[in-house]
Amino acid sequence: MKINAIIPAGGTSSRFGNRNKLLEKIYDKEVIKYTIDAFSASDVDEIIICANPTIMNELQSIFANYSKVKIIEGGSSRQESVFNGLNACNCDFVLIHDGARPMISTDLINRAIEMVKDKKALTVATKTVDTIKEVENGKIVKTIDRAKLYNTQTPQAFEYDLIFEAHRKLIGQNFTDDAGMLEKLGIDVYILDGSYKNIKITTQNDIEVAKVYLK
């Protein structure tokens, strides 16, 4: 039973600044290296990074000695990048994880692997703790019951054939969440409790938060 991981890394980091956030260093180590190190230590057999062409050479250098890592060209959207990764896979199950979530733990990755073998589709998520308001034109119209709300994270894990067929059916759309593609097709997706530390780095401020967690 073979397990692959797809790491979409094709974005331009437009909200981050003038440098790709995945190459930003925290304590002399690139953001994406924290991510890949966690997966390299896990039960994953192969890690496919779907990279923006502008950083492929740097990634090849960073991961030159990583036996599990393969780097391919990503697409013009996250969905396209993941589909490229799926086409490069040869596996039974696949985990899909944001390269910009460096606080992911090897333990959580392995728990996702064990759970997906039974459930076939899952997403790591955390229970919503803030009160959520629905707003229209700057005015609150409803307070939403947070008891049933979760904040979606990654990794998301799937039976390979299931997620590949979903991508094939929904090709050319703009899903930013792979679990959402299965939901669209009426396929059950389960929750694996994640960690509130598992944030996605989007802005410079997130780097400061990551420094606290990674110290």
Image: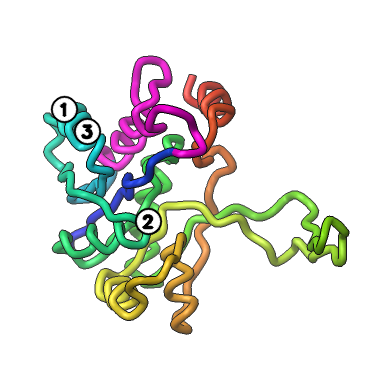
Q: In what quadrant of the picture does the N terminus appear? A: bottom left
In the picture, measured across the screen, residue 134 lies left or right of residue 43, that is right
- Disc 1 on helix, strand or loop? helix
Which residue is under mark 1? 61
The numbered mark, 1 or 2, whose residue comes first in the sequence reads 1
Magenta stretch contains residue 31: yes
Q: How many marks?
A: 3
- Label 3: how many Cα within 10 Å (few below 14, some 14–19, many 20+): some
Q: CA distance from mark 3 to mark 2?
A: 18 Å
Residue at 39 percent across and 63 percent down: it is 115
Q: Which residues are magenta?
A: 14-41
In the picture as drawn, the residue positioned furthest to the bottom comes out as 186
**Residue 29 x %, y %:** 34, 21
Which residue is under mark 3? 59
- Are circles 1 and 3 on residues that touch, CB within 8 Å? yes
- Label 1: how many Cα within 10 Å (few below 14, some 14–19, many 20+): few
Which quadrant holds residue 113? Answer: bottom left
**Residue 177 x %, y %:** 46, 62
Amino acid type shown at disc 1: Ser
Residue at 31 percent across and 48 percent down: it is 7
- Disc 3 on helix, strand or loop? helix
**Residue 39 x %, y %:** 30, 42
In the picture, measured across the screen, residue 37 lies left or right of residue 150, that is left
Residue at 43 percent across and 75 percent down: it is 182
Which residue is under mark 2? 78
